[in-house]
Image (tube, rainbow, N blue to C red):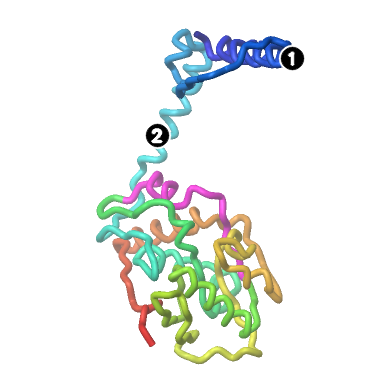
Amino acid sequence: MHIKNLFHFALLTAALCVLASCSHSTVKVIDSKGQLIRVDSTWDISNDSPVSVAIQAYKAKFNDKMSEIIGKAQTTLRGYRPESPLSNLAADIIKKKVSDVLGKSVDFAVMNDGGLRSTLYEGNITVGHIYEIFPFENHVVAVILKGEDVLHLFEEIAKRGGEGISGAQLQITSKGELVNCNIGGKPINPNALYTIGTIDYVAEGNDGMPSFKKSVKRQDYPDALMRDVFFDFVKSQTAQGKVINSQCENRIKVVEP
C-alpha cells in the first residue's frame, strides 16, 4: 500500500470509529488487539523515481562529507561523571574559544555531560563523528555571574554528580554535596564577578543548573556552534601534527568528609 493510501485508510478508519461511537448499538467491545506498523519502504514499493534520484544524489555528497577524516584520536574519549576525558576536552575548548573571542581569559568553563551524545573513538576522526557527539545546534556563550551565584552553581554541579569543567576544581561527595571548590586554585569571592564560558542550552539554566539564569551579563555567539568550535580545534591540532587526547585530572573529585 502506498503511504498516502495508508494515510487515507487511517482517516477512514477514524471516521468509522467516530460514527460507531455515535450509534445506539448495544454491542460492546470486550477485547482488542494492536500491533506496531512500521511506516517504511515496505508500504511504498512504487516510490517516486525523480524524488528518489534527487535524494540519492544529495545522500552521496552527504556521505562523502561525513566520511572526511580531519584528525586522529590517540585513545578513546568517553563522557561520564564526575569528570571524563571527553567532557574535560569539550570544556577546555569552550574556555579557549570564549577567551579568544573576548580577548581575555575567562575564569572557567562548563560543558554539560548530557550534551555529549557519543564517544570519540581511538583512530581517525571524521566529520560525522563530531556530528554524532554534538548533534544539536548549540553555540558558545559568555556568562558573568556573581561569586555567590558561582557557589550555588557548583552546588548544583555537585548535586548532579559532576559536569565538564575547565579552570575550576571541585570536591564533592557521592551523595552530591559540595565539600570544597576553587577557581584557578583560589577561593571564590562571593562579591566578585566571574566570567564563564558555556553553551546556550546551559546558560539558559537547563540540565539542573538554574544559577546561570542569575547572570549579570550574557553574550551569545550564535555563529560559534559548539560542533564547529570542536571541529576547528581538531583541524588546528592536526595542522600542527598533533593527535587529540585528554584525560581525567581530578577537576571534580569525589571525597567523603
- The kind of residue on which mark 2 rests is Asn
Position of residue 20 relative to residue 114, above or below, is above
Kindly indicate whether the residue at mark 2 contacts the one at mark 1 (C-beta within 8 angstroms).
no
Q: For numbered disc 1, what is the local secondary structure?
A: helix
Query: Which label lies toward us, 1 or 2?
Result: 1
Residue ID at (71%, 76%): 216
Residue ID at (62%, 61%): 221
Q: Nearer the viewer, residue 64 or 218?
A: 218
Q: Dot 2, how many residues are within 10 Å of its Cα: few (below 14), some (14-19), or many (20+)?
A: few
70 inside magenta stretch: no
Q: Position of residue 162 (x, y in %)?
A: 44, 71
Q: CA distance from mark 1 to mark 2?
A: 53 Å
**Relative to residue 87, is residue 201 drawn left or right?**
right
**Relative to residue 61, is residue 197 drawn left or right?**
right
Where does label 2 land, which residue? 63
Q: Which residues are magenta?
A: 125-142
Residue ID at (61%, 85%): 147
Quadrant of the image containing the C terminus: bottom left
Q: For numbered disc 2, what is the local secondary structure?
A: helix
Q: Which mark is residue 57?
A: none
Lower position in the chain sequence, tag 1 or tag 2 = 1
Q: Position of residue 36 (x, y in %)?
A: 46, 24
Q: Which mark is residue 22?
A: 1
Q: Nearer the viewer, residue 240 or 4?
A: 4
Q: Dot 1, how many residues are within 10 Å of its Cα: few (below 14), some (14-19), or many (20+)?
A: few
Q: Position of residue 225 (x, y in %)?
A: 55, 55
Q: How many numbered marks, from 0 up?
A: 2
- The kind of residue on which mark 1 rests is Cys
Position of residue 88 relative to residue 223, above or below, is below
Point out the residue furthest to the front here: 26
Position of residue 201 relative to residue 215, above or below, is above
